[in-house]
Image (spheres, grey):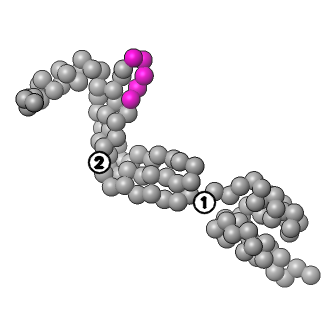
Amino acid sequence: MMPMNPKQLKKLMKQLDMRQLDNVVEVIIRLEDREIIIKNPTVTVIKAMGEKIYQIAGGEEEEKVKLVISEEDIKLVMEQTGVDYETAKKALEEANGDLAEAILKLTEGSP
């Protein structure tokens, strides 16, 4: 493949309706159970057949495990301890989703 000079590359990008997004700090891809964070990426937008395609490249990648607390867990803690929704949810968050720990924490000191 022959190398392209910058002028030819720019012309090709215009024909393909491609452009690069400037000043992108990070891209976050949210999944059900985690997030993928790409720092300092190069992001190119390509328009094709009425759709926008985002190409993301480079940067450091980090995965964060996201705590997912189900409605069933919140309801169970509410039933077992007699607390309201927000209190049950907060206790589960503080216990990193551990049902037993959340229930024990809420029932400590109760008669």
The amino acid pointed to by label 2 is Gly
Would you place residue 94 above or below residue 37 in this image?
below
Counting other residues with Cα less than 10 Å from the Cα at mark 1, is it few (<14), some (14-19), or many (20 or more)? few
Would you place residue 64 above or below residue 16 in this image?
below
Q: Which mark is residue 35?
A: none
Question: What's drawn in magenta, residue-wise?
Answer: 49-53
Q: Residue 96: horizontal and vertical position, in percent?
A: 64, 68
Residue located 45% across and 57% down the image: 63
Residue 101 seen in this snapshot:
yes
Residue position marked by numbered label 2 in the rendering: 58
Counting other residues with Cα less than 10 Å from the Cα at mark 2, is it few (<14), some (14-19), or many (20 or more)? few
Q: Residue 76: horizontal and vertical position, in percent?
A: 82, 62
Q: Which quadrant: the C terminus?
A: bottom right
Outermost right residue: 111
Residue located 52% across and 60% down the image: 65
* Residue 51 is one of the magenta-drawn residues: yes
Residue located 76% across and 76% down the image: 105
Q: Which mark is residue 67?
A: 1
The amino acid pointed to by label 1 is Leu
The alpha-carbon separation of the residues under discs 2 and 1 comes to: 27 Å
Q: Residue 29: horizontal and vertical position, in percent?
A: 47, 46
Left or right of 16 in this view: 90: right
Q: Which quadrant: the N terminus?
A: top left
Dot 1: what SS?
Answer: loop
* Residue 111 is one of the magenta-drawn residues: no
Q: Quadrant of residue 90?
A: bottom right
Q: Main secondary structure of the magenta part?
A: strand
